Structures are given as C-alpha cells and as structure tokens.
Amino acid sequence: MVGGRNASANGQRIAETLAADLAATLTIVSGLARGIDTASHRGAMHTGHTIAVIAGGIDQPYPPENTDLHRRIAEPICWSPRPPSHVPQARHFPRRNRIIAGLSLGVLVVEAALRSGSLITARIARKPVGKSLPSPGHRSTPAPWRQ
C-alpha cells in the first residue's frame, strides 16, 4: 500500500481501515513514509503483519516522527537495501519503491499526486517481472509455441 505523504485525514482513515482488513489474510508492504504509508502500517499491525521497506539504513528511522512505529515494525520485519547508519537521500527512494513493488502481489494506491513515487511504484508493479518457469523438455527441443 502506498500513497501521498500529505494525505487527508479521510485518506489516512481509509488506508488504515483497508490495511487492517487486508492484513487479516495478507502481509502489507509499504515504505514507512508520512501519510498513507504510516496509516497502512498502523492498520496492518491491528490485525496482521506488515513489512516496512525503507530508503536509509535500518537504524535510521525516517521520517523522525515514525521512530516508534519503525521500532515496532522492525521486530517482525523492516528491510533496507542500504547498510546500517546510511542516512536516506532522495535518490534512494526509487529503489525502495521498486522493492515494494517487487515484494507485492499488487499495489493499492490511496491519494497519490499525479507525479509521485506512489504512482511510479504502481506502474512498476503493473509490469511483469521475470518469473522462474520450468522448461518443458530438453532445451534443444523446439518449444511448441515457437513453431
């Protein structure tokens, strides 16, 4: 679940409710940003599990007001592609967004701006990723779909 950092109170309430409902059967993945991400993690923690993918080092809560939420999520799982003590920078967020999309079965967007990381994450999630598929027979045998 992703969405706007400057989300309305209604958008945050919707995100928290949806996350709580979905987390009863699914794990919620989000980026621990202000707004919708925060609401999604909080909602998920009411009924199930959540994964926070962060842009900085695992010991660098960002934004600072989510320090307590970061600690609570980190006990189950908080993941970062960056080494410890790495301070998050704007250029690290696109990679974080790709990881969120890659970990997710689908991306639910709540209140995103037209030019936002949330919509980039949704676009990435729409593209097929390289799945590992079994090969039918020996690789020198022509596949039926190529004939």
Image (cartoon, rainbow, N blue to C red):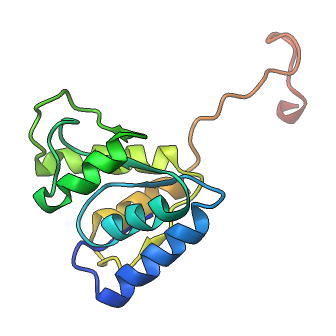
Q: Residue at x 44, y 71 (%)?
A: 109
Q: Quadrant of residue 39?
A: bottom left
Q: Residue at x 18, y 41 (%)?
A: 56
Q: Residue at x 64, y 34 (%)?
A: 131
* Quadrant holding the C terminus: top right
Q: Quadrant of residue 88?
A: top left
Residue 6 lies left or right of residue 104; in this view the side is: left
Instruction: Point out residue 82 in the picture as x, y percentages from the top left corner.
Output: 22, 32
Instruction: Point out residue 26 in the picture as x, y percentages from the top left corner.
Output: 61, 55
Q: How many marks?
A: 0
Instruction: Point out residue 37 in the picture as x, y percentages from the top left corner.
Output: 34, 64
Instruction: Point out residue 30 in the picture as x, y percentages from the top left corner.
Output: 39, 56
- State whether residue 141 is above or below residue 129: above
Q: Residue at x 45, y 59 (%)?
A: 45
- State whether residue 11 is above or below residue 54: below
* Quadrant holding the N terminus: bottom left
- State whether residue 95 is above or below residue 49: above
